[in-house]
Image: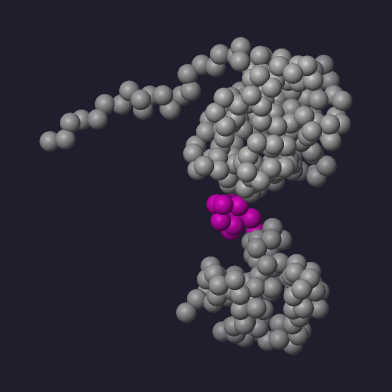
Amino acid sequence: MPVRTSAGYPTRDPGQRALKQALNQAKLFYSPQQMIAAAASLRPKSDKWTYSETGLRNFLEDEDGQLLPKNYDALATYWLYTPLGRALRYPDPREAPAFDRVTHALATGQETLPLGLKVDGRFYCYHGSYLHEGHFAIRIIEINSADDHILTVTDTVHDRKSFGKGNKVSTGAMVFADRRPQIVLYGHENKIGFSLMTGTDAVYDDDSELTELLGGFLVLNKDQKLAYRWFLMLRERDNDRAKMIKESGIYTRAELRAPELKRHSDAFDHLAKHQPGETHFIAPIRNYKIDDEQ
């Protein structure tokens, strides 16, 4: 019978083998006390979970040993479900699942950045709304390379029109494929799950700094409808984050004519003048002929 967590969900490690493997690797670098303390650090403050060092040793030494669900939950949260847990399970990357190639690609975005180019900074991002008909969105995209390898991305919009008004945030990573920037975002706000921003045209200044990016934005919105929008990203030199977020939002064309939004209206004019070519492999299905049923 599969082990069930305290939340009532069956684990994907019914024999607890994966957790045992990760903990056996961890004990090469950490003491039982440190392993238990690390697991406890991720528990809710109201949860006074603790576990004995003897109990942990017995679990690791007994090939058929099983943990109680609450103890499994606590240890697995830290030592199985985190990036550290995956690394401990697969110390030899050649033996890791193919999925790890995806996470590795996202985690090494800095290495894909063409030599000499710079992308750090804050950008306004303009596109047609995928929630409100006849509306246009201004988002804030922040790119940060403070990590040695990851180009982290934060996407923020101050939504005044949708249910649950306020700042809507998603996060992700940037990578380059054949010198073209791509951003993968994940969040549950005005869009659901993963979304992809693929750059088709990038402009760099004399210092090799990204100043403008044009491309396609593919999302699943909160109405569970697929939306594809062209977007334009423009670097903001003023870089006042609070001011930028205040100006972000979802606007009608009439609202964009307000004097205080003139610069953003100009940006949408720039995007509207762009006439992209036919999107490959989407339009052809419209001309697909279904044979008459016999």
Q: Nearer the viewer, residue 288 or 14?
A: 288
The image quarter in which residue 80 lies: bottom right
Does 20 sit left or right of 280 as displayed? right
| Residue bounds of the magenta highlight | 91-101
Percent coordinates x, y for residue 53 in the rendering: 76, 84
Q: Which quadrant is home to the C terminus?
A: top left
Does 51 sit left or right of 231 as displayed? right
Residue under the image location 52 percent in, 74 percent down: 14
Percent coordinates x, y for residue 60 in the rendering: 66, 81
Q: Nearer the viewer, residue 73 or 87?
A: 73
Q: Nearer the viewer, residue 144 or 116?
A: 144
Residue under the image location 66 percent in, 46 percent down: 164
Residue under the image location 54 percent in, 69 percent down: 9
The image quarter in which residue 72 lies: bottom right
Q: Is residue 59 magenta?
A: no
Does the rendering let one see residue 8? yes
Residue 192 to residue 141: above or below: below
Percent coordinates x, y for residue 104 in the rendering: 65, 47
